[in-house]
Amino acid sequence: MDAVVVDLTRELVRAESPTGRESPAATVLANALTDLGYDEVSVDAAGNVIGELRRGEGPTFMLNGHMDTVPAGDLEAWPHPPFAGVLDGGRVYGRGACDMKGPLAAMAVGARLAADDAVAGRILFTGVVQEEIGGMGARYLASTQGADVVVVGEPSGLRLMLGHRGRCEVRAVFPGRLAHAGRAELGENALARAARFVTALEGLDLPSRAGLGRSSATATSLVTWPRDGTNVVPGSAELAIDYRMVPGEARADILERLRALDEGASLEVPEEEFTSEDGAVKMTLPRENPAYLLDADHPVVPTARRALTAALGESVEVQTWWFATDAPHLAAMGAPIIGFGPGDPELAHTSAEHVPVPQLHAAVGGYRALVSAFLGGRP
C-alpha cells in the first residue's frame, strides 16, 4: 500500500477542489475507496464522501478530513505547479498536499488495512466539503452520522492533537458625522474613533486556558465612507476583528467585552449563507468556529498515544493546533475528537506546501493502529 497512498495523494492534488467546488476531488476519492474494497461508498446531499467498512457489532470509529483547498495564489511563487502533484525529493508538492489531501489518502488506506485486523465495529471514512469557509460539510455530516470516536486528520507533524482555539469574525461599525476636511471640527471623524478602538483593543485583558494559551483580538480590515472622498471627514467606519477564543467564551461574552471599548459602536458576528455545489443543501451560519479542547485525562487520550507510539516507534507528543478545524462541528455527535495527521501545519496555505512521503507512510500505520486500538483489533 506504500505506492497507493502516494499515488492517491498526487491524484487528489491534481483534482482541483476550491471551496464549494469539491466534486473533482470527491470523484477521485470515491473511486479510490471503491477500488480499495470499502463495503459501501456514497456521496451525501452536501457533497461529502463517505466510505464504510463493516466488521460486525461494535463501536463506530470515524476518520475525517476535508477535500476543499484555499486558492493557489501567485503561481510563479511555487517550486512546482500547484496542481501537478509533483513527486520530488521524497515529497509530494501542491495545493492541498498537506492540507489535507495527503492525510485523506493516508486515512483511506489506513482504515482499509485496519479492517483486516480482526476489528469489531464500523469504520467510517469521511471526506467533507467547505471546511475552509465555515464547515458546512462537517455540520451536515454531524446531523446525519454518528460515531463513538473521531480522528480529524489535519496536518500535525504526526503529533496527537487535542483541540484548538475557536474563531469568530466580529464586525464593528463606528458612526461619525460628515464634514469638509478643511473644516474638520464641524464633523465627527469615524476613522479616528475606530483608531482609538484599535489602540484599546491591543491592550485588552483576555482570558486564557491551559494548553491553548490566551484569547486574541486582532484588527484585520478597516473601511471608511465615503470611500472615494479623501477630503471628507469619514461619516462611518467599519472594522473587522479576528477574535480567537478559548473554551467557555460565548459569543455574547465576546461582544460585551469588545463593546466596553466603545459603547456607541455597533458590533455583530455576521452570518453567511452556504450552499452545496449542486444546491441541495443550504445553511445560514455565523462566521464563527467554536473552540474545542479534549481533556488530557479523557480515556481516549492514553489509548491513542499508546497506539501511535507503538506504530511510529517513538514517543508521540500531545499538543494542540494553532488554527481552527472541523472538530467542534463534529463534536456535536457527542464523540470525543482527537487529531493526527502527516505534514507540517506551517506549510498549509503557503506556496511551499508539500507532504513528505515518509510521513504519509507513517500516517497510514498510525491511522491503522488507532482504528485497531479502539475496535479491538490485532494488527
Image (cartoon, helix red, strand yellow):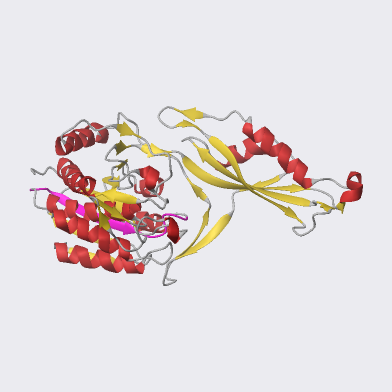
Q: Which residues are magenta?
A: 118-133
Seen from the viewer's position, the closer of residues 99 and 251 is 99
Residue at position x 32%, y 63% in the image: 84
Residue at position x 11%, y 48% in the image: 119
Query: Quarter-wise, where is residue 291 in the image?
Result: top left
Residue at position x 56%, y 30% in the image: 206
Instruction: Where is residue 97? Give x, y as percent.
Output: 32, 54
Residue 126 shown in magenta: yes
Instruction: Where is residue 120? Give x, y as percent.
Output: 12, 48
Instruction: Where is residue 289? Give x, y as percent.
Output: 47, 47
Side (left or right) of 112 relative to 285: left
Instruction: Where is residue 31? Give x, y as percent.
Output: 22, 68
Side (left or right) of 95 relative to 205: left
Seen from the viewer's position, the closer of residues 168 and 180 is 180
Query: Quarter-wise, where is residue 210 in the image?
Result: top left
Residue 64 shown in magenta: no
Seen from the viewer's position, the closer of residues 284 and 223 is 223
Q: Is residue 269 visible?
A: yes
Side (left or right) of 278 relative to 306: right
Residue at position x 42%, y 50% in the image: 350
Assign the N terminus to one quadrant of the image: bottom left
Depicted 319 relative to depicted 53: above or below: above
Side (left or right) of 260 relative to 92: right
Assign the C terminus to one quadrant of the image: top left
Depicted 290 relative to depicted 294: above or below: below
Seen from the viewer's position, the closer of residues 143 and 51 is 51
Q: Is residue 262 visible?
A: no
Depicted 137 relative to depicted 368: above or below: below
> Which residue is at the far bottom?
278
